[in-house]
Image (cartoon, rainbow, N blue to C red):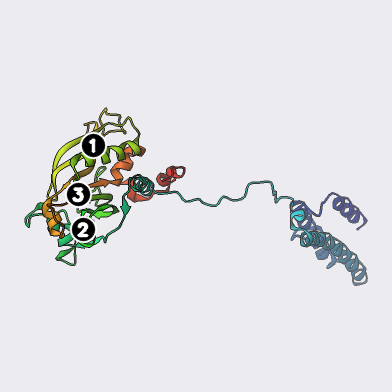
């Protein structure tokens, strides 16, 4: 017993009440299942009855002494938890709060909204579920136009009249029906097409539609607006070209291409090995469309355009697969954490 008490005293002087690990080792050594005190208690069974009492008292005293040391730790912790746990290092950086990142469609979309806002365009929105009139008929689509086909359009509840808008041009009609010129607005939003999903095409994507109606608006105004937009977004040196095109609701119509920034013109799957990527359709609003909305086409003229946001973001950030925008893999999204829009 004397030997054990000496060992106890030696050991306890080396244990700091503020070090949790040392204390735990100390506790296990003395009070654990195979600890010294536990061992002494079980040895006592074999002692003759007259010595049992004395030995019991001694072992109990030893147990109390060990417990007292352990209590010092809890006392310290009550006074100041930081002192009690030396393994809590307050100088270490805290656990990181997971920061969100803007989606590239939001970032580029906001940047585009900003460019047009500075040019005096006002932002408006329209519904994603549309009727045939706003999506097609008022936009001068012939009754047998292939875009109305089930192959391209998602219809709702088998009704040929209610559908998911295939373009944001439907908002042009809603705005012209409700507002008198001058109109200078943009309409950002989501559009839906029943297309096979590939690296270049998706069944959901985003557009920003623009509409400018006033007296004496010409194709030169349209070109200058879009040139300015593209050089603001991509920088002055960007390659821009207009190609004649066809849309039922504009006449004349054009598409605007940007020199491919993914392959620098060398040719890749995004530009279909042509060095150019189409980012928007545009044209002078067809007089039939103005008349469908009750606007005097003798007095007013104007232009419209529809920009694909994903296409534009792909060029801006060198993303070569449109599917990445919709998979929402955080490793993809996180790369845009430092971008602002
Ligand atoms: N709505 C057309 C499309 O989705 C783009 C467009 C908009 C063309 C406005 C001309 C004018 O392809």
Instruction: Look at the image and tell me whether residue 140 can be seen.
Output: no
Q: Viewed as shown, does residue 119 lie left or right of 286?
A: right
* Residue count near mark 3 (Cα–Cα under 10 Å), binned few <14, some 14–19, many ≥20: few
Q: Viewed as shown, does residue 142 lie left or right of 219?
A: left
Q: Position of residue 95 (x, y in %)?
A: 59, 51
Q: Viewed as shown, does residue 267 lie left or right of 45?
A: left
Q: Which corner quadrant holds the N terminus?
A: bottom right
Cα separation between marks 1 and 2? 28 Å
Residue drawn at x 32%, y 36% is 231
**Helix, strand or loop at mark 1:** strand
Q: Position of residue 72 (x, y in %)?
A: 82, 60
Please give the label number shown on residue 215.
Answer: 3
Asked if the beta carbon under badge 2 is closer than 8 A to the nearest atom of ligand 1, the reply is no
- Viewer-closest of 80 and 47: 80
Asked if the beta carbon under badge 3 is closer than 8 A to the nearest atom of ligand 1, the reply is no
Give the mark nearer the N terminus: 3 vs 1: 3
Instruction: Name the residue beneath numbered marker 2.
Output: 176
> Is the residue under label 2 in contact with that under label 3 (CB below 8 Å)?
no
Q: Against 238, is 93 above or below?
A: below
Residue drawn at x 93%, y 71% is 50
**Helix, strand or loop at mark 3:** loop
Instruction: Name the residue beneath numbered marker 1.
Output: 257
> Is the residue under label 1 in contact with that under label 3 (CB below 8 Å)?
no
Q: Viewed as shown, does residue 298 lie left or right of 198?
A: left
Please give the label number shown on residue 109.
Answer: none
**Helix, strand or loop at mark 2:** helix
Give the mark nearer the N terminus: 1 vs 2: 2
* Residue count near mark 1 (Cα–Cα under 10 Å), binned few <14, some 14–19, many ≥20: many
> Is the residue under label 2 in contact with that under label 1 (CB below 8 Å)?
no
């Amino acid at each position: 017993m004397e030997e054990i008490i000496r060992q106890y005293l030696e050991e306890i002087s080396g244990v700091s009440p503020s070090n949790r690990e040392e204390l735990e080792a100390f506790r296990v050594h003395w009070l654990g299942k195979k600890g010294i005190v536990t061992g002494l208690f079980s040895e006592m069974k074999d002692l003759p009855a007259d010595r049992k009492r004395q030995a019991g008292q001694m072992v109990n005293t030893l147990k109390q002494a060990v417990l007292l040391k352990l209590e010092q730790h809890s006392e310290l912790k009550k006074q100041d938890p930081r002192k009690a746990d030396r393994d809590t290092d307050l100088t270490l950086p805290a656990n990181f709060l997971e920061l969100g990142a803007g989606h590239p469609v939001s970032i580029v979309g906001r940047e585009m909204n900003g460019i047009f806002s500075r040019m005096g365009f006002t932002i408006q929105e329209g519904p994603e579920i549309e009727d045939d009139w706003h999506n097609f008929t008022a936009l001068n689509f012939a009754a047998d136009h292939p875009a109305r086909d089930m192959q391209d359009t998602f219809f709702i509840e088998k009704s040929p009249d209610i559908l998911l808008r295939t373009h944001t041009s439907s908002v042009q009609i809603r705005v012209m029906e409700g507002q008198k010129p001058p109109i200078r607005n943009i309409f950002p939003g989501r559009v839906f097409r029943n297309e096979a999903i590939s690296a270049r095409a998706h069944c959901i994507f985003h557009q920003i539609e623009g509409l400018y109606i006033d007296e004496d608006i010409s194709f030169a105004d349209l070109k200058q607006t879009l040139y300015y937009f593209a050089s603001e977004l991509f920088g002055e040196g960007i390659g821009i070209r207009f190609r004649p095109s066809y849309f039922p609701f504009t006449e004349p119509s054009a598409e605007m291409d940007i020199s491919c920034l993914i392959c620098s013109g060398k040719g890749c799957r995004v530009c279909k090995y042509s060095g150019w990527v189409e980012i928007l359709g545009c044209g002078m609003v067809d007089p039939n469309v103005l008349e469908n909305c009750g606007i005097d086409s003798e007095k007013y003229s104007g232009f419209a355009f529809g920009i694909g946001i994903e296409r534009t973001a792909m060029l801006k950030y060198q993303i070569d697969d449109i599917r990445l925008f919709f998979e929402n893999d955080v490793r993809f999204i996180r790369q845009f954490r430092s971008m602002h829009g």
